[in-house]
Image (cartoon, rainbow, N blue to C red):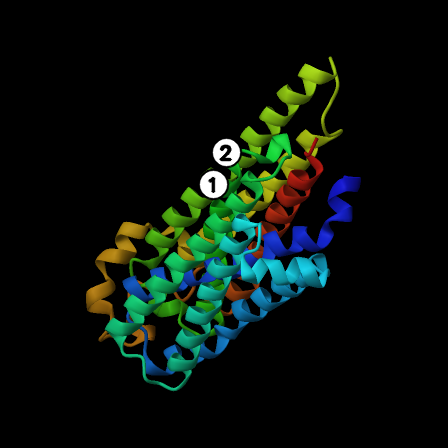
Amino acid sequence: MDLALLQLPMVLFTTLVPMASGAFIGLAVAFLTTRFSKEHLERIDRWTLLPLAILAVGYIASFVALSSPQYALSLFQGIDIAPLSFVGIAGMLFVALAVVYWIIAMTGNLPERPRKVFSSVVGVASLLLALSMGVMYMGSAVLTWNSALVPLGIMGFAVAGGVPLGALVIGLGGGLPEARASRFPAVALIVALIGTIVSIFAVSAQLLFAQSAFSAYVAGGEVLPGSWVYLIISIAGFVAMLATLRSTLMPGGRTAAALGRTAGAAAAIPLRDREDVDIDAPVGIRSAVPLLVAGNAAVLIGIFVARMMFYALQF
């Protein structure tokens, strides 16, 4: 892990930026499936600053890594490093879209339909940013990085890490009761599950590839001592996230289909009188946010360990 520790700022960059940008995928899913009250939308928009702040921390880490003025300048001017230029362009595009979206939303000038379209565009831009980060490493001379598994894995991180972060923003904004009564739980869990499967597949396949390539040079050697322990820790983080996400979005074991069928009629019924929201469920509204925080922490650890493995698997 010495190589990974030497590149810790880039580990943080490739951990925080996909997860923070992917939060807009979770928000887009919420807006496409749920009709929130005006009061909750205002609070959700204020809490959208959270993923933007995490995004800023990630970019600060990248600036620390790219501390050489000439290297940083070439990133934005596209001089001799096209993959890095792709990351710069995709990053600036996403940041611009996300900030403009947030500003318009904060002014209260974002009606329901434009909000759905705009949030979806920002979500797609987050996937483009994740793709560009992976393509950057594919152009490297490092054998274990020159693989399509790299962008696939980072895109998986954006989805698997972004959906629970988006759900946390919804919870902090007070929109969880409305979200639970819509199709959001079903869609969010499916999207998060897809991101988790893609992430675990990419990380596991890259580890197997690195081990087989290393064994060809050093018979019986291990490319990263304890690698399978790190892999298990990473997988556990993703699984814990899915478990907490299901517990908070589907309290009391209610199925997503049941929640979705009641969404239309529920909008006109007070929360206390609605049968589709279980007030006495094991995971209530108040306890849901801390559980979502725990789920986000778990997937953050899972992604971080996966990125540490990535930087350690280079030869």
Q: Residue at x 33, y 52 (%)?
A: 187
Whether the residues at callouts 2 and 1 have beta carbons within 8 Å, the answer is: yes
Q: Secondary structure at mark 2?
A: helix
User: Which residue is the site of mark 1?
Assistant: 152
* Whether residue 180 can be seen here: no
Q: In the picture, residue 45 is in which quadrant?
A: bottom left
In the shown orientation, is residue 77 left or right of residue 255? right
Q: Residues within 10 Å of mark 1 (few under 14, many from 20)?
A: many
* Whether residue 142 can be seen here: yes
| Location of residue 2 in the rendering, given as x and y in whole percent from the top left corner | 80, 41
- Specify the farthest residue to the front: 79
User: Which residue is the site of mark 2?
Assistant: 201
* Nearer mark to the viewer, of 2 and 1: 1
Residues 34 and 144: in front is 144
| Location of residue 310 in the rendering, given as x and y in whole percent from the top left corner | 64, 39
Residues 190 and 269: in front is 190
- In the picture, the quarter occupied by the N terminus is top right
- In the picture, the quarter occupied by the C terminus is top right
Q: Secondary structure at mark 1?
A: helix
- Specify the farthest residue to the left: 265
Q: Amino acid at mark 2?
A: Phe
Image height of 286 relative to 165, above or below: below
Q: Residue at x 53, y 48 (%)?
A: 83
Q: Amino acid at mark 1?
A: Leu
